[in-house]
Amino acid sequence: MKKGKVLGLLAMSAVLLTGCVDAMPELTDEQSEIIAEYAAGLLLKYSPNYNYKIVSEEEVAAAMAARQEVSEPETENETETGSGQTEDEHPQDISSETEPSESEPEMEQVQFVADLDFAAELGIDDLIIRYQSFEICGSYPGNNSGFSVDAAQGKKLLVMHFDMEGLPEEDVDCNLFDYDIKMRVNINETASAAVLSTMIPNDLASYMDVVHAGESVDVVAVAEIDDMTEEEIQSLTLRASSNGQTCTVKLK
């Protein structure tokens, strides 16, 4: 009975469509697909060989989940492949981690002043230079004759005296300026000051004169320090260098 009704409806639709084909509006692709699906659904619904039923929401959800599980592995594989290419294109640079660090500089040996010959330590020929004493003053020389050095306000001068001897049997034409002597003092292991370059005639770093055989000359090294007394100086260390040769000597 149902089959006859379906066939009758289809025959009637064909007649109606044939009779007014000129008046039929043009359908879009989407509208054509909807009509085709509807017609197919009617045929299947009334077909005795088709078990028609409405799909439940649970079955729809299960079908969607199964579809998502199929698509997810493909996405993960693509992501892993992309990250692998990124790592290949930008390899990590580990050379800096494997490079050895620079070795620490060796500690400089500190000598004590007992009869130390500064001339021998600094490579100065034909002379013997030994430390004698130090004094603190506001101006040197104190008699202000010729060239002198004055301490700045709130400062003092540390004057270190040295005995310089020439050869025992002949005069030595001395020119210490050519040796480029540099000196620095450390006081009480806290304060540090560079020895000044002065125009004093007996400045150790620039002394130019004849040292007669068997005679001794008083030469000095002058540094400007904070205002203090001689008694306040508990330790005094001098570091001297000349043309690549150095020595560090504890004077007190």
Image (cartoon, rainbow, N blue to C red):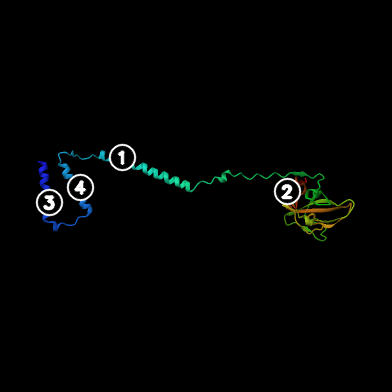
Q: CA distance from mark 3 to mark 2?
A: 118 Å
Which comes before the other along the chain, label 4 or label 1?
Answer: 4
Q: Is residue 249 above or below residue 198?
A: above
Tag 3, which secondary structure? helix
Tell me the kind of residue under disc 2.
Asn
Question: In the rendered image of this protein, does residue 6 appear above or below residue 22?
Answer: above
Dot 3 or dot 4: first in sequence order is 3
Q: Are marks 2 and 4 in contact (CB under 8 Å)?
A: no
In whole angstroms, how far apart are the C-alphas of marks 1 and 2?
84 Å
Q: Residue at coordinates 46% horizontally, 47% vertically from top-left?
A: 86
| Residue that extends furthest to the bottom in the rendered view of this protein | 146
Label of residue 186 in the image: 2
Q: Can you give x and y, in whole percent of width and height, for residue 191 in the image?
A: 71, 49
Give the x, y percent position of residue 11.
Answer: 11, 49
Q: Amino acid at mark 3?
A: Ala
In the foreground, 179 or 46 = 46
The N terminus - image quarter: top left
Quadrant containing the C terminus in the rendered view: top right
On the picture, is 56 further left or further right than 100? left
Location of residue 18 (image quadrant): bottom left
| C-alpha separation, residue under disc 4 versus residue under disc 1 | 25 Å
Which is more toward the observer, 109 or 222? Answer: 109
Residue carrying label 4: 37
Numbered circles on residues, count = 4
Label 2 secondary element? strand
Secondary structure state at the residue bearing disc 1? helix
Neighbourhood count class around disc 4 (C-alpha, 10 Å): few under 14, some 14–19, many 20 upward: few
* Residue located beneath label 3 in the image: 14
**Residue picked out by circle 1:** 66
